[in-house]
Image (cartoon, rainbow, N blue to C red):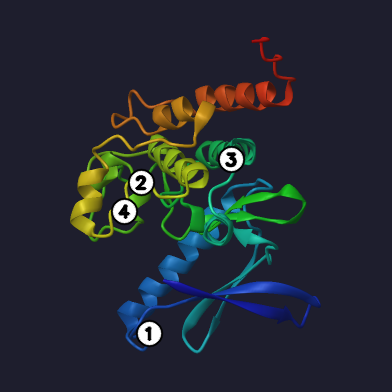
């Protein structure tokens, strides 16, 4: 849906990220309208969430009939890039990432925004420990129709069952995607990705196998509850992750002598 460029802002003399919206047939009026609607939705949804964990939007401009979003340039790498290069992360760092993402999602939900595409590729691990949730390109407001209509857009391996089934969705759907993201971070593999659309869709109804999650397991399981009414809430997940973080910083009891 887009390509991001490194660019110079010649007016304000700063380096920025420039997102080009990619849609074929931009010479067609209907396609141009769709491209602008897509870009405007992303820019407005992102700008609506005032949080350090969301990329800053500077402008929305047009060049050769194509909309471009001028954004803050992020340092570091995406979580997916880190996992591809180094493998799964320890429980401690994943717990901190989870807390940061929960804060961002709570801010988005308070602003009436459902992200709908939480996944490792949209999580940026920046310099100084900053964690940013990017790409609000398919975000919607909580005032919108709360069911999928038209062509499905999203990453199947991270999408909640209610969205996949075309049912009502809301902030709880983002929490499911957060659970799938944390599973990937600590286990090194997406919980439901089976390499094909039919197999992945079927796997979402199953319970993933945990090997390395340790104390994170029950939090992730709570976030991955199939029924959104039974899914762990943001407050519950926040308290649980804080507890894991606190216990991790405490000295462990000495092993009993044999």
Residue occupying the point 66% across, 59% down: 56
Q: Is residue 62 left or right of residue 202?
A: right
Residue at disc 4, secondary structure: helix
Q: SS for tag 3?
A: helix
- Looking at the rendered image, the disc whose residue lies closer to the viewer, 2 or 4, is 4
In this figure, which residue is indicated by the disc labeled 3?
Answer: 94
Can residue 233 be seen here? The reply is: no
- Residue drawn 74% across and 74% down? 15
Provide the secondary structure element on which disc 1 rests: loop
Label 1 vs 3, first from the N-terminus:
1
- For label 4, the residue is 156
Q: Nearer the viewer, mark 3 or mark 4?
A: 3
Q: Residues within 10 Å of mark 2 (few under 14, many from 20)?
A: few
Earlier-in-chain disc, 3 versus 2: 3
Give coordinates of residue 114: x percent, y percent. Answer: 44, 45
- Given contact means CB atoms under 8 Å apart, are the residues at marks 3 and 4 in contact? no
Residue drawn at (57%, 42%), measured in percent from left and top?
101
Disc number for residue 26 = 1
Secondary structure, mark 2, is loop
């Amino acid at each position: 849906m887009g390509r991001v460029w490194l660019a110079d802002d010649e007016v304000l003399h700063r380096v920025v990220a420039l997102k080009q919206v990619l849609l074929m047939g931009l010479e067609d009026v209907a396609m141009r309208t769709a491209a602008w609607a897509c870009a405007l939705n992303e820019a407005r949804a992102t700008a609506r969430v005032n949080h350090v964990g969301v990329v800053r939007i500077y402008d929305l401009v047009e060049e050769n009939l194509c909309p471009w979003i001028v954004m803050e340039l992020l340092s570091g790498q995406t979580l997916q890039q880190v996992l591809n290069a180094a493998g799964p992360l320890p429980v401690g760092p994943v717990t901190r990432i989870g807390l940061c993402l929960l804060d961002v999602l709570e801010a988005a939900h308070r602003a009436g925004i459902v992200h709908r595409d939480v996944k490792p590729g949209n999580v940026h691990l920046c310099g100084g420990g900053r964690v940013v949730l990017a790409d609000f390109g398919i975000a919607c407001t909580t005032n919108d129709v709360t069911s999928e209509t038209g062509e499905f857009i999203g990453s199947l391996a991270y999408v909640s069952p209610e969205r996949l089934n075309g049912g009502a969705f809301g902030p709880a759907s983002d929490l499911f995607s957060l659970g799938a993201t944390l599973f990937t971070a600590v286990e090194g593999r997406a919980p439901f990705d089976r390499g094909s659309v039919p197999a992945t869709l079927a796997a979402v109804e199953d319970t993933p196998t945990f090997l390395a999650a340790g104390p994170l397991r029950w939090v992730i399981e709570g976030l991955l509850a199939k029924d959104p009414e039974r899914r762990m809430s943001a407050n519950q997940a926040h308290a649980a992750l804080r507890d894991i973080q606190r216990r991790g910083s405490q000295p462990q009891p000495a092993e009993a002598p044999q």
